[in-house]
Each structure stands twice: as structure tokens, then as C-alpha cells.
Image (cartoon, rainbow, N blue to C red):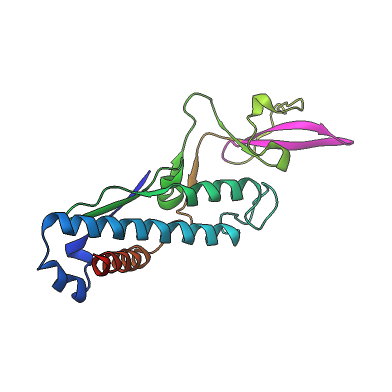
Amino acid sequence: MIDIQIEINDTASPAVAQLLRGLEGDEIAKHNDAGGRAATEAARQYHNAFNKQDKWQGDRYIGGSGRGGGRAGEYGSEIAKSWFSGDGTDEGVTISNDVLGIRQKVYGGTIRPKKAKALTIPLIPGAVGVRAKDYEGNLFMLKGYKKAGGTNFLFEVYNDGIRAVYMLKKSVTQKPWPGALPEDELFVGAFTLGWLDSYEAQ
């Protein structure tokens, strides 16, 4: 889960800062709430566009069609839909996204298996999103076959030979995904516009 805290005293433009002096706490909270909804919508639009441009697909992506489709497209759609804002207070508002794995995308880090001995990394499209034990083919390991670093593989018979279906790794370290989170300016700008619209409509 990712939380983006927008504090009105830190992000207020000069115009908003001047308006704050004449407002009570509950009025400020109401406008902060409106600003939070606007920032949430801006984040959704950002990630919808990000997904349609296939930016969740890396150089080695094998999970299906582009244009926001395939496994990456499904996940990107979930990210876009999962933005929400908490209730505004007189101090600000929190914008959040609770889709599974979003923190890993934003900050990166090392992934290790919790129960299994190794992570199973799919190497062919038919293995994407399928656990090794649920894979339809007959998987096997080649005795004595390992790459540098102890990496092993699960193979299957394919045509007149064999092919690797899964890579087995004890851990995988991922870098932050470029653009996984909008820049602060997007949140602050949308919040400010939403705040001012709320103030002018009162």
C-alpha cells in the first residue's frame, strides 16, 4: 500500500494560504476533502494513460498483447482503479493506493519465497500467472544443470527437444519501476485546483 500525505500548510499556493486565514477548521477540512478527491482522480487518469502506453511492460515482457492488454494491462488497470482518498482534516488529506505489489513497483526491493524453496519465474507466455504445480505440461529438472549463481530451471519436452518453462531463483532484487508513481507536482496541482473549486462553490 502507498500513502501520499498532502498537508495544506506545506503545499498551499500563496492564493490558498491567504484564503486559509479566514476559514475555520471544519471549512478547511471540507475543502481539503475536495482537493483529495481531485488528486485521486488525477492519479487515476495518470495511471490509465500510463497503462494504455504499455509502460508496465518491460523489455522482457511475455504476458500478452499490448495497448493496455495482457497480464500487465490487467494489473495496470487495477492500479488505476485502486486510488482513493481519506477524509480531509484541517491539516490535509491522505491519498492511497492499496493494490497488491504497488510498494514493490514504486520502491523496488528483494523478493524471497515465503514457503517454497525457490521463486518460479515464467519464461514462456503459457507459464505467466500459472504456478509451477498447476502448469499443464510435465516439468522436470536436468540433473547437474545450473547456471552461474546457482540458478536452475524447470523444463518440458517441446517439439523434438526441450525448453525451459520456469527459472528457479532463491531471490530476485528489483529496481523501482520508472514512472510507477506520479510526481508530487501532479498530486499538489490537482489538490490545489480541487480545493479552490470547492472554496469558490461555497
**Magenta stretch, main secondary structure class:** strand
Splitting the image into 4 quarters, where does residue 99 fall? top left
Relative horizontal placement of residue 128, taking residue 84 as reference (left or right): right
Query: Residue pushed farthest front?
Result: 202
* 41 up-or-down from 196: above or below: above
What is the x, y in percent for residue 109? 42, 45
* 181 up-or-down from 189: above or below: above
Residue at the (48%, 45%) spot, across then down: 173
What is the x, y in percent for residue 177? 48, 55
* 34 up-or-down from 117: above or below: below
Camera-side residue: 38 or 198?
198
Query: Residue pushed farthest right?
Result: 160
Q: Quadrant of the N terminus?
A: top left
In this rendering, the count of numbered labels is 0
Which portion, as a residue range, is magenta? 149-167
Camera-side residue: 104 or 155?
104
What is the x, y in percent for residue 160? 89, 36
Residue at the (67%, 36%) spot, across then down: 166
Residue 47 visible in the current orientation: yes
Q: Is residue 163 magenta?
A: yes
Residue at the (27%, 66%) spot, across then down: 201
Relative horizontal placement of residue 59, taking residue 142 as reference (left or right): left
